[in-house]
Amino acid sequence: MKKGKEHYSKEFKESILKKLENQPNLTIPEMAKELNISKSTIYQWQRTKKKKEASSLRNKSNGNWSSEDKFHIVLETYSLTEEELSAYCRKKGLYVSEVKEWQNQCLNANLSNTKAPQEIENELKDEKKRTKSLEKELSKKEKALAETAALLVLRKKSQAIWGDPEEE
């Protein structure tokens, strides 16, 4: 009797491939025998993973790395030596300088805002008060300007009706 096609979870496949990646002395035939899985099945998982990675790299080779991707790359490479980092970058189609820049960005991400939340809140209140004061001042000036414009219009009308005041 022929065995039906087995279905393995994505997590299971990933764990097997990760185990093979992290243990270079472990071969696929050994793993297949240990788990009672066909060697060709594991090889197929590996090919599929490589195709996905290659497709992903083609899409990202033009520099369209998401923030999340960059962060994962920084995590994966932070403890690598220069040689290991170079090999990793060649595999992923990256430049070492890009990865180092991303590492610096991650390290400095929290340095830009060193003020305490209470201090920021107080500054915001001060700015709101200042804005309100400036708006009041602007309103007063607009009213004064409107009044001046109205007086000028009245003056011109009075001159048109009665003429210029005669000089004595």
Image (cartoon, rainbow, N blue to C red):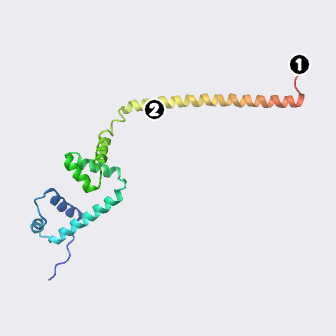
Q: Residue at x 32, y 42 (%)?
A: 105
In this rendered view, identify the residue nearer to me: 71 or 63: 63
Rendered view: 85 above or below 160? below
Image quarter where the C terminus lies is top right
Task: Locate residue 126, reporting x and y percent.
Answer: 47, 28
Rendered view: 71 above or below 167? below
In this rendered view, identify the residue nearer to me: 100 or 7: 100
Left or right: residue 58 compared with residue 30: right
Task: Locate residue 90, reporting x and y percent.
Answer: 25, 54
In this rendered view, identify the residue nearer to me: 59 or 19: 59
Q: Residue at x 53, y 31 (%)?
A: 131
> Where does label 2 land, which residue?
124
> Where does label 1 land, which residue?
167
CB atoms of marks 1 and 2 within 8 Å: no
* Amino acid type shown at disc 1: Glu
Rendered view: 144 above or below 70? above
In the structure shown, which secondary structural element does the residue marked by tag 1 occupy?
loop
Task: Locate residue 32, reporting x and y percent.
Answer: 12, 68
- Residue 21: image tag: none
In the structure shown, which secondary structural element does the residue marked by tag 2 occupy?
helix
Q: What crowding class fits label 1: few (fewer than 14 Cα within 10 Å), some (14-19), or many (20 or more)?
A: few
The CA distance from mark 1 to mark 2 is 59 Å
Left or right: residue 33 compared with residue 97: left
Q: What is the number of callouts on the image?
A: 2
Image quarter where the N terminus lies is bottom left
Figure quadrant of residue 14:
bottom left
* Amino acid type shown at disc 2: Leu
